Structures are given as structure tokens and as C-alpha cells.
Image (cartoon, coloured by chain):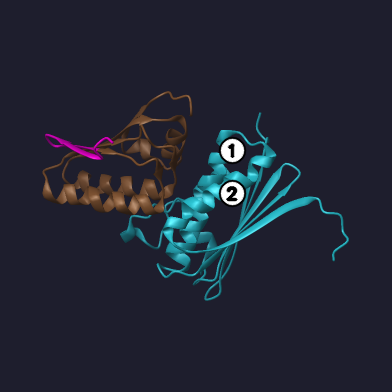
Amino acid sequence: MDQVYQIEGVSLTVQMPAELDHPSSERLKKETDFYLENYHIQHIIFDFRNTNFMDSSGIGVMAGRYRLLDLRGGSVEAVHVSERIDKILHLSGMHKIMKIHREERKDG
Amino acid sequence: MDKKKKTANEMAIEFDGYPSNEGFARVAVAAFCTQLNPTLEEVADLKTALSEAITNAIIHGYEGEVHKIRLECKLEKNTIYIAVTDKGKGIEDIEKAMQPMYTTKPELDRSGMGFVFMEAFMDQVQVESRPGEGTVVRMKKVIGGQV
């Protein structure tokens, strides 16, 4: 299994879970904040390559981490975003606060 | 026995409001609605909307305490009806609760987008609530509606 959290310089890459819902978001929030508190992180990359479900709990986690990093002059972005996830991110206005990199996938 | 001819197909599940049951509820509805031959997109829409309603019941209705949540589904012709009922604290101001970005729990990093998602992914969303008694969210979606 891939590592969920990877630090490279001031960047933290987070592998998003297959189902980004209420319980997995709570876990993700707690773990991500551990890294933000203990390392000098300026940038978070949320990697959606394994994610096939997401609801507004996931939006809450990303928006919350954005606010924390924005205070430090940092930023967040999303990579390997499927059409479905992209739709949800846009619906929530997340494209206004973060870069979103689409990935064409057969499973949408 | 009711002699009326049955035209609808119904199911109901009652489960404890543990966050870990949200995935179970999504899968149950997804499996039940396959009879209407939905697209993957339509199934994803139903799962997201349902997830929002159940998360609301757990976080806002019961505020972290574990009580029963009732999920009812009905298939009639090409339409799925979903009702999620909790007996929690209820919603004081439904109109306000349904506004985008409005949340009573920003400290929990809630996005305030739950009802927005329900309305975006379903054809109709109705909320009935009484403070101190609980909330019912009724949603409806026509399957095979978009070509």
C-alpha cells in the first residue's frame, strides 16, 4: 500500500481515501493537522487518484486546511481529480481557492 | 390485508447513528435502486445526497450521541423516493439551515454544503422538522431523467 502522507520539503502530499465521507474525513483532518503542527508545511497536495466517493465532509476538511495554510501564506491543490470529484469541488466553489488538476478516468 | 394493487417497491432500514454505518446505508440504497437500471452517475448522485442527510442526522440531529436513524426507500415507476428520519434535536430555522455555507458547527470543519449537495443531486428535497422532536428529509429523483 502507498504511504498516505508524504513530506517533501515544505509540501505535504495526502493520498485521499477511496470513500471520502464523514468518518474518513474526521480521521484525515486529525492526521493532517498532526503534520501541520509538527512540520513546516506550506503546501498541501490532495491526491484523489484512489477516491471514488466524496461528500461535503471532504469539502469541509479541505476548506479548513486551506484556511490554516492561508494564514501561513501557503496553499492547497488537488491532483488526479476525476470528473465526479471535479463536479463536487466546483459545486462547492473550491476551484476559487485551490488549483484543481483533472485526470481523465474511465470510471468517471 | 390491503387489497389495493401494489405499484411501488419499498424498503426500510433502521440503524444506529454511527458514522461507520454511513457507508452501509449508501451501499444499501445503491443496491436497491439497481432495479431502475440507473447510470453510474445517478447512483453516485443518490449516494452523495443520502450521505449528506445521514451525516446531518448524526452530527446535527443527535450531536454525536448514538440513536436510531430510519432510512426508507420507495421505487415507483422510474422514480426513487428516499426519506431519512431522526428523532434528534430538530432544526429551528429550516430555510437558514439550507443556505449554502451556513453551518452551526464551523468548529468541526463542516462546510455548510450538505443541503446544497442534496438539492444539486436530487430532483426534489423537502425537510420537515420540529425542534426537540426530530427531522425528516424527503428526497426524490427520476432515474433515466437525463439523456
User: Do tags 2 and 1 sit on the same chain?
Assistant: yes
Secondary structure beneath dot 2 equals helix
Which residue has dot 2 on it? B29
Circle nearer the N terminus (2, 1):
2
Residue A21 shows which numbered tag? none
Q: CA distance from mark 2 to mark 1?
A: 12 Å
Question: Residue B34: image x %, image y %?
Answer: 64, 40
**Percent from the top left, x then y, of residue A105?**
44, 25
Residue A9, relative to residue A37: is it above or below? above
Mark 1 surroundings within 10 Å by alpha-carbon count, few (fewer than 14), some (14 through 19), many (20 or more): many
Q: Quadrant of residue B70?
A: bottom right
The N terminus of chain A lies in quadrant: top left
Residue A47 position (above or below residue B11): above
Q: Nearer the viewer, residue A29 or B29?
A: B29
For the colour brown, the matching chain is: A
Q: Which residues are magenta?
A: A1-13
Helix, strand or loop status at disc 1? helix
Q: Quadrant of residue A18?
A: top left
Mark 1 belongs to which amino acid? Glu
Residue at 24%, 50% in the rendered image: A31
Which residue is depicted at the point 63% across and 36% down? B38
Viewer-nearest residue: A51 or B106: A51
Which chain does the residue under circle 2 lie in?
A: B
Chain under numbered label 1:
B
Q: Position of residue A96 (x, y in %)?
A: 35, 37
In the drawing, what numbered circle is on residue B42?
Answer: 1
Give the quadrant of residue A97.
Answer: top left
For the colour cyan, the matching chain is B
Q: Looking at the picture, does residue B139 appear above or below residue B37?
A: below
